[in-house]
């Protein structure tokens, strides 16, 4: 914790101040390229979050109706309701995959109907559950416009370079998530000419770092992708897939996974399998939620706050 | 009552013959069938030996979809299997078939198909 606790410009109190509009969660900041994580779950005040604020939503699994959450569409709607209630409108939203549970047209339709209620631009990357239709075409038809390959792309906002990657297609027997050579080459070229001071936000469904290979929680060629980002002072990697908040800091790279809006999954190795975890009804909403991320100009800080549906 | 007694007797006989055969489901009956259950993100059994001509049926018992794909595309890939969905494939050519779950590729399994006649019989 000593790394996280040191005061390097923005103290804990100030960090708390920019949490006002999100309520409860875990707040992250990046200072001088060094991520700074505070495990805060509680109410905060102040509304001085200037700069760029965007939201991360993940693992909606629309269509899931098993005991772990018989109404995944309902909890997605609750999450979007919370987004709409934010006093400060985020610039946009990213969705880190598993929009649907079985890639059915009706599931994508339902998801779109609810998510569009946020009236935010949404930048999607697919999860493995979004490529389960026989022809593996629905995701690309709906969300792939202007993207490369299976749906990767980059864009800029407020001086931050965002890169959406796809690591859920062409998976290899015995392996983990997979980016593949085409995407790696594209990534290398995409970041090559950018200045090292550009903050980078990389997002993909499966964690790009190895969380727990026994459950397939990692990306085989994730390290290769990250090797192209070594020169950058600030790299933030946002993932989903594991339906729980997990964080890691390695050099200038901050890794973070978001909660699902559908159902929780067990901590690595805490159950016989990573399948949906059934919890007490009144506990479910404390284990579902979204994340919000703020990049503050001048302060070189990126703050990530995880907000459960119910504190 | 009479019917259930008869059923029980038939069931007993069936179980007896399978046990006598030594290899569950792999008896050279017509048509031969074998089952693989997908439970807790694993294939059960993980390795299965059958005679050529056997229809192997995978059934997903998890709350998460799985999909069956041969490692070298040696047999037809299944559609996504939701909870309790099944996929069957009839193996006619002897050989060793490696497969995996294309949704969760860390899940792997093997099917060994032996010649229908001759070779290692279990008798």
Image (tube, coloured by chain):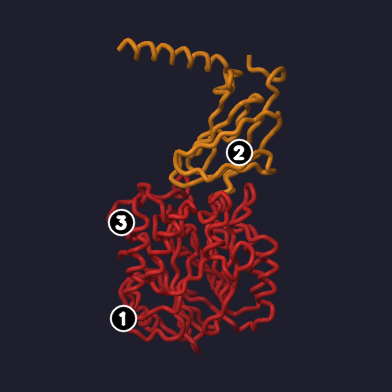
Chain colours: A red, B orange
Q: Which residue is mark 1?
A: A45
Q: Which residue is mark 2?
A: B109
The answer to whether tags 3 and 1 share a subunit is yes
Q: Nearer the viewer, mark 3 or mark 2?
A: 2
Q: Is residue A137 above or below residue B116?
A: below
Q: CA distance from mark 3 to mark 2?
A: 36 Å
Residue A290 in the image, given as x and y percentages of width and height: 40, 67
Q: CA distance from mark 1 to mark 2?
A: 54 Å
Q: Which residue is mark 3?
A: A283
Q: CA distance from mark 3 to mark 1?
A: 25 Å
Mark 3 falls within which chain?
Answer: A
Which residue sits at x=33%, y=70%? A82
Q: Residue furthest left?
A: A282
Q: Nearer the viewer, mark 1 or mark 2?
A: 2
Residue A190 in the image, given as x and y percentages of width and height: 66, 75
Q: Are marks 3 and 2 in contact (CB under 8 Å)?
A: no
Q: Are marks 3 and 1 in contact (CB under 8 Å)?
A: no
Q: In the rendered structure, which disc, 3 or 1, sits on the residue that comes first in sequence?
A: 1
Q: Secondary structure at mark 3?
A: helix
């Amino acid at each position: 914790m000593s790394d996280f606790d040191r005061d390097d410009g923005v103290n804990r109190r100030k960090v708390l101040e920019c949490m006002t509009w999100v309520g409860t969660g875990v707040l992250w900041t990046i200072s001088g390229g060094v991520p700074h994580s505070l495990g805060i779950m509680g109410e905060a005040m102040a509304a001085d979050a200037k700069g760029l604020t965007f939201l991360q939503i993940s693992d909606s699994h629309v269509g899931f109706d098993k005991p772990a959450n018989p109404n995944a569409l309902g909890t997605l709607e609750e999450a979007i309701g919370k987004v709409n209630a934010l006093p400060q409108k985020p610039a946009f939203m990213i969705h880190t995959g598993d929009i649907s549970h079985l890639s059915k047209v009706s599931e994508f339709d339902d998801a779109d109907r609810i998510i569009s209620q946020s009236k935010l631009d949404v930048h999607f990357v697919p999860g493995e559950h979004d490529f389960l239709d026989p022809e593996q075409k629905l995701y690309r038809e709906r969300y792939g416009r202007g993207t490369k390959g299976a749906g990767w792309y980059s864009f800029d906002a407020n001086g931050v370079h965002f890169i959406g990657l796809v690591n859920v297609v062409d998976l290899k027997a015995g392996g983990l998530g997979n980016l593949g050579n085409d995407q790696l080459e594209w990534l290398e070229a995409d970041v090559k000419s950018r200045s090292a001071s550009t903050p980078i936000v990389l997002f993909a469904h499966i964690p790009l770092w190895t969380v727990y290979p026994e459950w397939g929680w990692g990306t085989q060629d994730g390290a290769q992708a990250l090797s192209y980002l070594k020169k950058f002072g600030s790299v933030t990697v946002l993932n989903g897939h594991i339906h729980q908040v997990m964080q890691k800091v390695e050099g200038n790279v901050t890794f973070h996974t978001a909660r699902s809006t559908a159902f929780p999954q067990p901590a690595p190795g805490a159950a016989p399998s990573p399948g949906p975890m059934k919890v007490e009804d009144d506990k479910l909403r404390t284990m579902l939620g979204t994340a919000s991320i703020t990049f503050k100009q001048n302060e070189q800080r990126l703050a990530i706050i995880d907000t459960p549906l119910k504190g | 009552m009479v019917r259930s007694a008869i059923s029980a007797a038939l069931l007993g006989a069936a179980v007896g013959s399978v046990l006598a055969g030594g290899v569950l489901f792999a008896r050279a009956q017509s048509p031969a069938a074998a089952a693989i259950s997908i439970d807790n993100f694993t294939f059960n059994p993980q390795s299965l030996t059958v005679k050529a001509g056997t229809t192997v049926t995978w059934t997903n018992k998890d709350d998460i979809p799985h999909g069956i794909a041969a490692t070298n595309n040696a047999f037809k890939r299944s559609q996504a299997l939701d909870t309790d969905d099944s996929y069957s494939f009839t193996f006619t050519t002897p050989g060793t078939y490696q497969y995996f779950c294309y949704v969760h590729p860390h899940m792997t399994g093997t099917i060994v198909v032996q010649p229908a006649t001759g070779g290692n019989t279990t008798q």
